[in-house]
Amino acid sequence: MGLPALRNVEAVPIEHNGAQMVCLRDPEGIVDQQVFLSPKAFFIAAHLDGANDVTDIQYAYARHFRGALLMSEDIRKVVESMDQSGFLDSETFSAMRRQVLETFTAAEARAAYSAGRAYAEDADALRAQIDEFFVSKGGPGAKPDGRPKIDAPAAGLIVPHIDFTRGGHVYAHGYARLAQHARPDTVVVFGVAHSSGATPFILTRKHFDTPFGRVETDQELVDALAGACSWDPFAEELTHRTEHSIEFQAVMLAYLYGTSVRIVPILCGSFRDPSQPSDTMAATEVPAAVESFLDACRDILVSARRSVTVIASADLAHVGPRFGDAFPVEDGVIRRVRSRDDEDLAFVAAGDARGFYRSVMRDGNARRVCGLYGIYSMLRSLDSEKRQGVLLAYDYAHDPAGGVVSFASLMLE
């Protein structure tokens, strides 16, 4: 009988206390702590596929390392430790997940998961942190003054969801422009389901807690959108618990408006049929079920008796060894990324949803534009695709594990 399988976890090679290690983290967020494995322990973990037993792993180790021996006790210690930590697909993890699900389901609001991790937990400290985004190098130069210059709310906005430390100045450009418009009653936020997404869209009725107060969801619009789904939009609701792409926008909206604005949180899973090769022409077309939902979304927002702004919380390219590429990130790679990003964003600025989607997918999304579905959904949800967009800011940031992530702020007036 095989040993328990390793769960779908993120593995990053690092140097820890002067030694080469592999850091494992749980993208689903059920397990908070990280696990650091030696190369030998990682070899064992990588061979936990649910079928291999102790003897199979010993044989694989001896074959890979030319006859080197791996003791049964060492394998069992690694398996026991990882099981207790929740990194194996076992009853131990199932019990952990059930407890987390029960707690999340019972809560009225989604807790500010990233507070104290990715941004300050204290409201005053967080406000000072965000204030700095506007006046720091690369920012718009001044904080919003609270006096809108345009009577109507903005139609649509793209802003990043990269961490505030690396992308705060680009967030600031988007929210500075948003503050020039009248405050909307409701903001629809299309985020990215980084760790899940078997269904194309994932909804939640839960409010979002932030250090600035609770941002309530627009329950009426959430229910209307749920009725337009041909799948269960709450089946993967637990994904919202730790996903930062909507949380970061809830924080920025609360910074700008306090708790006077409501949100509709929508996480985008994958649109693509996993059985369909990504490099075929069919991959450039959006499935009918997604198009039907977005048609309904547009109609629901247009007929809503309230003013609505639609935000795509979206980063752009993810390129380099950290993301699976065989080549290092050099100046030429960054220039090519910028050139392709510019091509895609030109379609966005023209309000051309289908042109944008086909532009990204013409090479099978080789740059791994994680905001593809959110940006497309934002464009399709507006009452007219003939919008005039303006690129407010563009930048990229290096990933410490070897890679680059690009991102932008773009306003559709």
Image: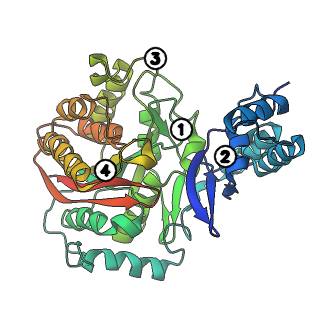
Q: Amino acid at mark 2?
A: Thr
Q: Which marked residue is nearer to the observer: mark 1 or mark 3? A: 3
Residue carrying label 1: 196
Quarter of the image for residue 348 reads top left
For mark 4, does the 10 Å Cα neighbourhood hold few (<14), some (14 to 19), or many (20 or more) residues? Answer: many
Instruction: Give the camera-side residue of 155 and 371.
Output: 371
User: Which label sits on residue 105?
Assistant: 2
Circles 2, 4 touching at the beta carbon (< 8 Å): no
Residue carrying label 4: 311
Residue carrying label 3: 275
Q: Which marked residue is nearer to the observer: mark 1 or mark 4? A: 1
* Separation of marks 3 and 4 at Cα, in angstroms: 30 Å
Residue 164: % across, % down: 40, 66
Instruction: Give the camera-side residue of 305 and 361.
Output: 361
Q: Earlier in the sequence, mark 2 or mark 3?
A: 2
Q: Residue at x 36, y 45 (%)?
A: 327
Q: Residue at x 27, y 75 (%)?
A: 134
Residue 211 left/right relative to 389 = right
* Separation of marks 1 and 4 at Cα, in angstroms: 21 Å
Residue 215 left/right relative to 187 = right
Q: Earlier in the sequence, mark 1 or mark 3?
A: 1
Q: Amino acid at mark 4?
A: Ile
Instruction: Give the camera-side residue of 378 and 346.
Output: 346
Q: Amino acid at mark 3?
A: Ser
Q: Secondary structure at mark 3?
A: loop
Q: Which marked residue is nearer to the observer: mark 2 or mark 1? A: 1
* Separation of marks 2 and 3 at Cα, in angstroms: 32 Å
Q: Secondary structure at mark 1?
A: loop
Circles 2, 1 touching at the beta carbon (< 8 Å): no
User: Which label sits on residue 383?
Assistant: none
* Separation of marks 2 and 4 at Cα, in angstroms: 26 Å
